[in-house]
Image (tube, rainbow, N blue to C red):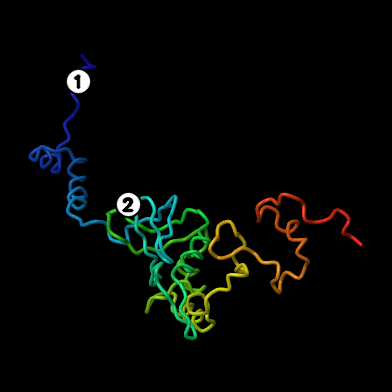
């Protein structure tokens, strides 16, 4: 009979309230949080989290489409792909050039952008990085996007305009590769490397040895085996 002694009752004011409301304390404590969550609007930008966006498509310099998100980079004005720029009275397709440079910068890498938990179907403005690189800063510094007034890239944008970089300068010389873009296969519209540039003083027959794979294989070898004199 000793093992069947009833447990002593512990009177408590909170226990009486819980019994009156028919809810144990744990459920009662959870109620305010549930009500707060259900009554809140979609998460504010402060609650967005860095998300890796796989298989990004750079549709313009400063805009990325990936995984259902349409992301415009914060702090800048996107340069549309069909935009034209004028320099010293000459018009050129700066929008396409800017997009090409942006695609070369991404090179298929997955950017990390601060976006909502799920795509909403609406464009979002977000900060994005690739590794330690701030994508928006890179675009503005190189003149491939315009800094937003009052944003973090104003000084970089003024410097890019002063030094006539990107869209603020002349049309790129398509006869030479861009110095910071050494991947001809990814930049078909920028132009193939030329053997007549100032930085390539070597004879043309040395080109196949310097850039193997940059051109389709020739039907016959160009360089002679005994050219060393």
In the picture, measured across the screen, residue 162 lies left or right of residue 5, that is right
Pick whichever, 19 or 215, lies toward us.
Answer: 215
Identify the residue at the far front of this view: 219
Q: Nearer the viewer, mark 2 or mark 1?
A: 2
Q: Which mark is residue 109?
A: none
Is 162 situated above or below 129?
below
Residue 82 lies in quadrant: bottom left
Q: How dense is the environment of label 1, judged by Cα within 10 Å: few (below 14), some, or many (20 and up)?
A: few
Assess whether mark 1 and mark 2 are in contact (beta carbons under 8 angstroms). no
Pick whichever, 120 or 228, lies toward us.
Answer: 228
Q: Residue at x 17, y 35 (%)?
A: 10
- Coordinates of residue 47 in the picture (x, y in percent): 32, 58
Q: Cα distance, mark 2 to mark 1?
A: 54 Å
- Coordinates of residue 80 in the picture (x, y in percent): 39, 68
- Coordinates of residue 133 in the picture (x, y in percent): 51, 63
Q: How dense is the environment of label 2, judged by Cα within 10 Å: few (below 14), some, or many (20 and up)?
A: few
Pick whichever, 197 or 159, lies toward us.
Answer: 197
Which residue does the numbered mark 1 point to in the structure image? Answer: 5
In the picture, measured across the screen, residue 53 lies left or right of residue 207, that is left
Identify the residue at the far right of this view: 229
Is 17 situated above or below 174?
above
Identify the element where label 2 is drawn: loop
Tell me the quarter of the image containing the C terminus.
Answer: bottom right
Which residue does the numbered mark 2 point to in the structure image? Answer: 117
Q: Residue at x 46, y 72 (%)?
A: 93
Tell me the quarter of the image containing the N terminus.
Answer: top left
Identify the element where label 1 is drawn: loop
- Coordinates of residue 17 in the picture (x, y in percent): 10, 42
């Amino acid at each position: 009979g000793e093992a069947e002694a009833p447990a002593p009752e512990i009177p408590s004011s909170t226990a009486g309230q819980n019994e009156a409301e028919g809810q144990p304390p744990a459920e009662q404590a959870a109620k305010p949080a549930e009500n707060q969550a259900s009554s809140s609007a979609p998460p504010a930008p402060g609650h967005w989290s860095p998300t890796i966006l796989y298989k990004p498509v750079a549709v313009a310099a400063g805009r990325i489409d990936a995984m259902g998100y349409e992301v415009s980079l914060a702090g800048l004005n996107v340069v549309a792909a069909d935009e034209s720029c004028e320099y010293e009275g000459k018009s050129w397709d700066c929008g396409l050039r800017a997009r090409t440079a942006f695609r070369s910068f991404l090179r298929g890498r997955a950017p990390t952008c601060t976006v909502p938990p799920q795509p909403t179907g609406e464009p979002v403005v977000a900060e994005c990085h690739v590794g330690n690189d701030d994508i928006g800063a890179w675009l503005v510094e190189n003149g491939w996007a315009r800094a937003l007034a009052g944003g973090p890239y104003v000084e970089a944008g003024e410097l890019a305009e002063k030094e006539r970089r990107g869209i603020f300068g002349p049309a790129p010389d398509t006869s030479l590769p861009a110095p910071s873009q050494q991947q001809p296969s990814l930049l078909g519209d920028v132009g193939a490397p030329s053997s007549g540039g100032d930085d390539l003083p070597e004879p043309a027959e040395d080109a196949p040895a310097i850039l193997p794979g940059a051109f389709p294989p020739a039907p016959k070898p160009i360089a002679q085996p005994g050219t060393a004199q």
